[in-house]
Image (cartoon, rainbow, N blue to C red):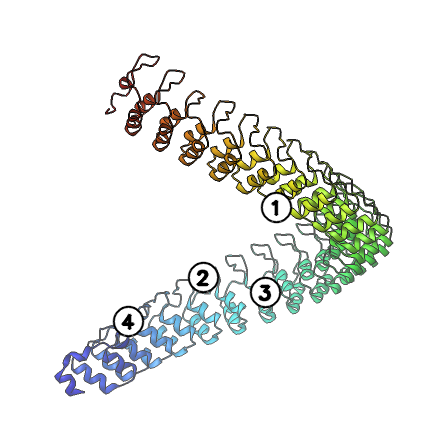
Amino acid sequence: MKMILKEKGSYTNARFEGMKTPIMIAAENGHTKTVKILLKYGADIAKKDVFNRQPIHFAFSGRQIEIAKLLLENKADLSAVDKWKKTPLMVAARGGDAQSTELLLEHGADVSMRDEDHWTALHYACKWHHHQIIKLLFENKADPNAVDKWEKTPLMVAARDGDAQSTELLLEHGADVSMRDEDHWTALHYACKWHHHQIMKLLLENKSDHKAVDKWKKTPLMVAARYGDAQSTELLLEHGADVSQRDEDHCTALHYACKWHHHQIIKLLLENKADPNAVDKWKKTPLMVAARYGDAQSTELLLEHGTDVSQRDEDHWTALHYACKWRHHQIMKLLLENKADPNAVDKWKKTPLIVAATVSNAESIELLLEHGADVSQRDEDHWTALHYACKWRHHQIIKLLLENKADPNAVDKWKKTPLMVAARAGDARFTELLLEHGADVSQRDEDHCTALHYACKWRHHQIIKLLLENKADPNAVDKWKKTPLIVAARDGDAHSTELLLEHGADVSQRDDNHCTALHYACKWRFHQIIKILLENKADPNAVDKWKKTPLIVAARDGDAHSTELLLEHGADVSQRDDNHCTALHYACKWRFHQIIKILLENKADPNAEDKWKKTPLIVAARDGDAQSTELLLEHGADVSQRDEDHSTALHYATRSGHHQIMKLLLENKADPNAVDKWKKTPLMVATREGDAQSTELLLEHGAHVSLRDYWTALHYATRSGHNQIMKLLLENKADPNAVDKKVKRPLMEAASAVDVQSTELLLEHGANISPRNKSNSTDLQRGDCVCL
């Protein structure tokens, strides 16, 4: 090694993995001889590795005293810090190396230095219970009250980690028992939390304040009560701890002891005059807490010390409400034996009986009834315990309540009875129970719905059967005049529909929109129901308030199967709604080709007009449906029919550029020169829209280029600069000198628009520039910027 270093001295400070130098590796592994040689050949003891550690850090972390001495003799920096700002002294204190600590202190190591968490060497020594090092540090003036970044002192560290000897040493050297961390905890709080009794005793003997409160106003007594330490509680009480102190939630130590079932502590607190009726910020007493968390022993202790069973929290709940809610039967028994009121109401007017019914607690119900609970009491929604039992399907509870004279016909604020609730929930067993106890099947809620309406809506067939067998009216109407049959048909329930019809349901009844059950079945495509209704004489031609028949509904919604069924049972294809639309109009509008075919085969009139005089053909042409157009033409649709604007199907097809439909119409003798109420021909429409293909089609089928409304087709094409269309028109003998009402010619339009290409086209086809218009100006004068 000496030879290598002599010949290649640059290796002395070479870097290896983690930026370690040879001297760091040697120090870490305790190779004293190697360290000596490296120092001789100029090893740099100030170099740092990737974690900013110097050789001296490695020597002390590995307890290599001889190497440490060599480094110190060579002026190693005692204050060198690694990336976490730890000094060699902290490393030695953390590792419990008293010899190294002494060596460092002899060479002047600074005991006050702090790492990135503001810990001193004393914090580390206390954390790891290194008593000899603590002693050495104190002999060198270490501060017992130094605080870390969380404001914790070495005393708090020692108290938290249960080191009585360190605590004693710290107290002997002036540690302040009153100091608090960032949460305002004192060393006594930590000792109480972790059950360190010897430390508590030391702290209390050194005047630690047992009334000190943390940032949440919790005292050491509350901490001890929370964590179930009876010995700590006793110690604190012996030193005068105040049992009446409250935290920020107004909880006392007794509240915490009750919450966590610490019976010995509860007993100690009560013997020391803790108030069993103290209320927290939510007005909960320790008794309520014990009842809520199911602690019968705590409840008994509190009752023996005079707790008031009638107290209520901010929601007006008593301890009995809590015991019922959480099914704590033993506690309920204790409370009722101590005169708890079984009929006390909370802020929502719920009694313990209602609460018990809500959570399906039969044993609680039985107990309450034995102690005089009133089955007729109602909450703010006027629900009784029976309503809740029916909602949650509690058979045993329903039976108990009914046997104790609960009213099966009691109504809530929406006028719903328990029978309606049961029918809605779908439990046949308790529907039967209610009926056996006199439930009235004819009662209605505020929407005039009966139990049968609810059973039909939710498809509870067994309940429907029970209700009908008990004389429920299958034709009862709700506030919208819907019968159970309409409800069943709307919701697609064939079984319910059959049951209702077997019991006399009237298929002809209508709701407030005049819709029958058949209308709803058609709307939602329930084919089995449609079939059942039609077999039971439902009228396929019944009209709703908009005069729509089931056939119109089926055609509008694209249901071919329903359409066929209706036609087989005599549906009239000619009926019209309030807009005079037939089923065929709707099928054409929504492109339902199969339905169009079925309707036409059943003699639907392809020329029927709606209130705007539109035929199915006009509708199909307007909406671009070539297949519908073809079907209609095959069945005799008249291409010459016009709507209220005198527009033909060809006008509509042209306007939307539906070339295939235009071709079909023209091949079927549609007039290309028909004029609408504004005297526009299909050709004018095509030229105005700039559609060259439509223009060509119309010209091929004899469209007259000379016809005019205010303008000719050429005027429209020129005005919009459609040169291809202009060319087509001019080649088909359109007059380039035709004038409008103001004696304006196409050339004038082109010149005004400064359209060179249109101007040239018109001139090539004989447009005259000399004639004057009504304002006596020539085309050249009005467009003199055009190069002619």
Mark 3 vs mark 4, CA separation in Å: 46 Å
Task: Say which of marks 4 and 2 sits in front.
Answer: 4
Q: Is residue 487 visible?
A: yes
- Is the residue marked by circle 4 packed among few (<14), some (14-19), or many (20+) residues within 10 Å? few
- Is the residue marked by circle 3 packed among few (<14), some (14-19), or many (20+) residues within 10 Å? many
Mark 1 vs mark 2, CA separation in Å: 83 Å
- Residue 226: mark: 3
Q: Which residue is mark 2?
A: 181
Task: Say which of marks 3 and 1 sits in front.
Answer: 1
Q: Secondary structure at mark 2?
A: loop
Sequence-first disc among 3 and 4: 4
Q: Which residue is mark 4?
A: 50
Please state which amino acid type lies under the numbered disc 1: Gln
Query: Where does the N terminus fall, quadrant-wise?
Result: bottom left
Task: Say which of marks 3 and 4 sits in front.
Answer: 4
Please state which amino acid type lies under the numbered disc 2: Asp
Could you tell me which residue is drawn at 63 percent across and 32 percent down?
A: 608
Q: Is residue 47 left or right of residue 123?
A: left
Please tell me in which quadrant of the rendered image residue 22 appears.
Answer: bottom left
Furthest-left residue in view? 7
Q: Which residue is mark 1?
A: 594
Please state which amino acid type lies under the numbered disc 3: Arg
